Amino acid sequence: MIKLRNQELIILIVTVVIFAGFSIFLDKFFSTGNLLTLMRSVSILGILSIAMAVVVISKGIDLSLIATLAVGTALASVMSSPDVLPSFDLPFVYAVLLGFLFTAILCAITGILVAYWDMASVFVTLAMAGVIYGLGRTLFIGDELNYLPEDAIWLEYLGRGQLLGVPMPIICFLSLAFIMHLVLKKTTFGKFVYSIGDSGLAARTAGVPVRPILVIIFVIAGLVAYFAGLLTAGAISSINTRMVSGSMIYDVLLVVVVGGIGLSGGKGGMHNVILGTLLIGTLLNGMVIMDISFIVQNLIKGIILLIAIMTDTILNPRDEQTTQQGDI
Amino acid sequence: MKFKTLKLIIVALALMLPLSAQAEKMGIADPARDKYYSALQGKRVAFVPLAMGFDLTEGWYAGMKKALEPLGVEMILRDPNWSADAGSKAISSLISEKPDAMVIHNPDVQTYAKLLKKAEKAGIHIVQVNMKSAFPTDAFVGADYIEIGEIVTQKVVDQCGPGTSQKIAIVQGVLTAAASAYQLRGVSNILEKNPNIKVVSNQAADWDSTKARAITETTLQQNPDLCGIVGFWDGMDIGTGAAVKEAGMHEKVFLATSGGGGKNGCDNLENDIFDVFVSYDVPGQARDLSNALKSLLQSGNKPGKAGKVSFFTQPQILTKENMASYMGSGACWTVESLSSN
């Protein structure tokens, strides 16, 4: 049984209150169809938040997730589109593996810079986002909008198919969260991740191979983001690399912070990601139903992020330990 | 020795060449030719789009290169990749490099206005493309977005007459973008005349197909009797259309959108993602751009001194049924087809 911390309890209550409010006051909010729509529209956000959560638990942050997602996926689609790159006409499955490899290598570089060069992850990943995007666009991806090749039917099934009436992205999100939960809570690797997030120094003294673990964390996060990218592409049969310059990365942070994974590291788990995703999904869905304008939607999201960080600061105050080791 | 004789023979032949040519000259000479070619030879034209890598800008650039480079015009490209700031810097540095003309794709009506004025003062002809600045320059080439908004909305309204739910949804782009704001005016022009139409959702999807998809999904859940959707750009509305199709409602919900008229848009008509696709004919615009440049460079007028001219693009209203007949006039183009001869 998962024990809820104070903060999580607050968020759970807030989610339930908003959800109940919408159900009562918004026509057709509480219907199976709308609830599935709600979940599916945020399931990609949820998968990205799984990636971010793992990094944040180890007291890092990964701002290059969207770049990884878009470039990796666009690379896969370009590699198997003969009219885009005539020399590459790979079957889509191989192209996906190539994208996998590309993502893994670049994320390993990020991890090495953070772990072995001792640089702050916020700066490394900010720079790497530019490197990944620039490299991908100059070397391989000519157009922003890349359509999936015709043999990507299996991916389109993952992106828009259903299993027993439940859209596949929801199933992917929940299964991935479950797998990550097992990894974090039941394996030695998971224990190491928490111990690094709690105190890198103490973990090293205790014999945890901090640096290799950090590299692995960034590779895992990148690959999860790549998977989210494939699902995005499957849902609309195309991937647009312009999303790199959008605000999606802040939505991901919003989910992680609102869900109650402390930015000071070592805390939280997959239940926080699911909770955060549900709260944001409920809000987004409700706001669209109420036809609230885009600017006001951003305002509401911003205020919620602020409140969440304030709650985080009150409930996890900066103590001597954080002062010594610094924040993210 | 041998080499010297060879040289002599060549010189002798070269001297005879004009004689023989003169002997064969027939027909009449066109005095305007020289003026045309010499006016363009060696000129430099800079292109500052919002970004390369998407159909509109790639199409314009390919079309201009194809038309102007054979005439000896040098094309310079500065790609600010969606950053208005980088675009301003590019224009500033171009002003000091002083090309003969610039083709500018404005991010909004204000950002570049002062720079364009400065550029004209510095003696550079400015042609604006598709997105207007508040400062009018020698020429504007592009879609009349208000008209595009009107056509798209009218198509949807026509489908949603009495007997239907008369409910429609609007999927806008980025609120501050001129292309979105002008289209919205067009939409409201038509809606004013049709007070029976109910707008049940009017959301901005930020030119992002994923967002368009999520918004449309929710709108369809809320309004299963939705009649039509007004979309603002084909690249974004593949998400809108995917949501409609996935809900199994593409027979009932009429989706009209607009864009550059490229092959991908046509494919989406073919696959029933869109019902109407209003094209602003990028191949035609590329030709208009090239001709505007040719005319400015030949005119001998000082930049900004002659009357300002506009070339509004004649829109092509494409449907699954009629698109084949538009292919001869440039619809369903690819960048390759614009750059090859």
Image (cartoon, coloured by chain):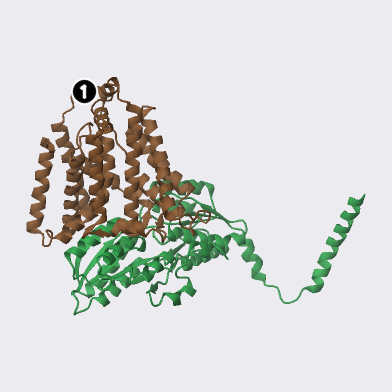
Chain colours: A brown, B green
Where is residue B177 shown, x and y percent of the image? 33, 57
Q: Quadrant of the C terminus of chain B?
A: bottom right
Instruction: From this view, report whether residue A323 is shown above or below residue A297.
Output: above
Relative to residue B11, is residue B187 drawn left or right? left
The type of residue carrying mark 1 is Gln
Residue closest to the eye, B105 or A199 = A199
Residue closest to the eye, A193 or B67 = A193
Q: Residue at x 12, y 62 (%)?
A: A28
Q: Residue furthest right?
A: B1
Which chain does the numbered disc 1 sit on? Answer: A
Instruction: From this view, report whether residue B16 is shown above or below residue A43.
Output: below
Q: Residue furthest top?
A: A205
- SS label for mark 1: helix
Where is residue B27 shown, x and y percent of the image? 73, 77
Q: Residue furthest left?
A: A24
Relative to residue A293, is residue B288 drawn left or right? right
Residue closest to the eye, B236 or A181 = A181
Instruction: From this view, report whether residue B152 is shown above or below residue A47.
Output: below
On the question of residue B206 being in view, the answer is no
Q: Residue at x 27, y 47 (%)?
A: A47
On the question of residue B141 being in view, the answer is yes
All told, the count of numbered labels is 1
- Tell me the quarter of the picture where residue A106 sits: top left
Disc 1 marks which residue?
Answer: A321
Where is residue A288 shown, x and y percent of the image? 19, 58
Residue closest to the eye, A120 or B179 = A120
- Tell me the quarter of the picture where residue A312 sits: top left
Where is residue A261 shown, x and y percent of the image? 20, 37
Relative to residue B310, is residue B156 drawn left or right? left
